[in-house]
Image (cartoon, rainbow, N blue to C red):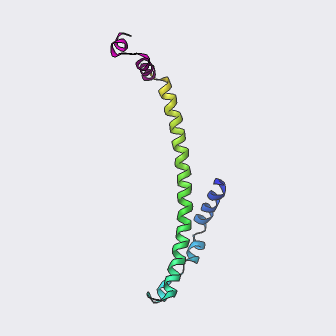
Amino acid sequence: MKKIIFIILVMLNLNPTNVKAKKIDCTQFDKISAKYLECSAKNLKEKSGVLKLKVTLGAEELKKKIATNTKDSKKKFNNSSLKEKLIKFKNSKTLTEFMEK
């Protein structure tokens, strides 16, 4: 699925005339007319479709980045001395017991 979305975005970026050719010039209609509203709605729909594809790809990349960062941080925490001190603190019943150990 990710590959398909990526291929679509690449195709749109490599062929910008395709997107620009679909955009209709709405200045030829009166701004109050129904044809102008229909024209601007079509243009907005095309822009929002492209934007939606870009956002979904960006979100997927962000999820991957966050997942790799959490794995790295877990490894760092497991290897740190802070983990040992935290376990020691949790196992102690009182503060004086924690300070003695």
Front residue of 93/101: it is 93
Tell me which segment is drawn in magenta: 81-101
List the single residue furthest toward the top.
Answer: 100
- Looking at the rendered image, the quarter that the N terminus falls into is bottom right
Residue that appears at 36% across and 12% down: 97
Question: Compared to 75, does 90 lie above or below?
Answer: above
On whether residue 13 falls in the magenta region, the answer is: no
Q: Position of residue 27 (x, y in %)?
A: 47, 85
Residue that appears at 49% across and 33% down: 73
Residue that appears at 49% across and 85% down: 36
Q: Position of residue 62 (x, y in %)?
A: 52, 48
Front residue of 18/95: it is 95
Question: Compared to 10, does 70 lie above or below?
Answer: above
- Looking at the rendered image, the quarter that the C terminus falls into is top left
List the single residue furthest toward the front.
Answer: 93
What is the magenta segment's predominant secondary structure? helix
Residue that appears at 39% across and 16% down: 93
On whether residue 88 falls in the magenta region, the answer is: yes
Horizontal side of 67 relative to 30 (left or right) equals right
Q: Position of residue 21 (x, y in %)?
A: 58, 77
Question: Compared to 2, does 37 lie above or below?
Answer: below
Question: Total of numbered circles in the picture?
Answer: 0
Q: Position of residue 24 (x, y in %)?
A: 54, 81
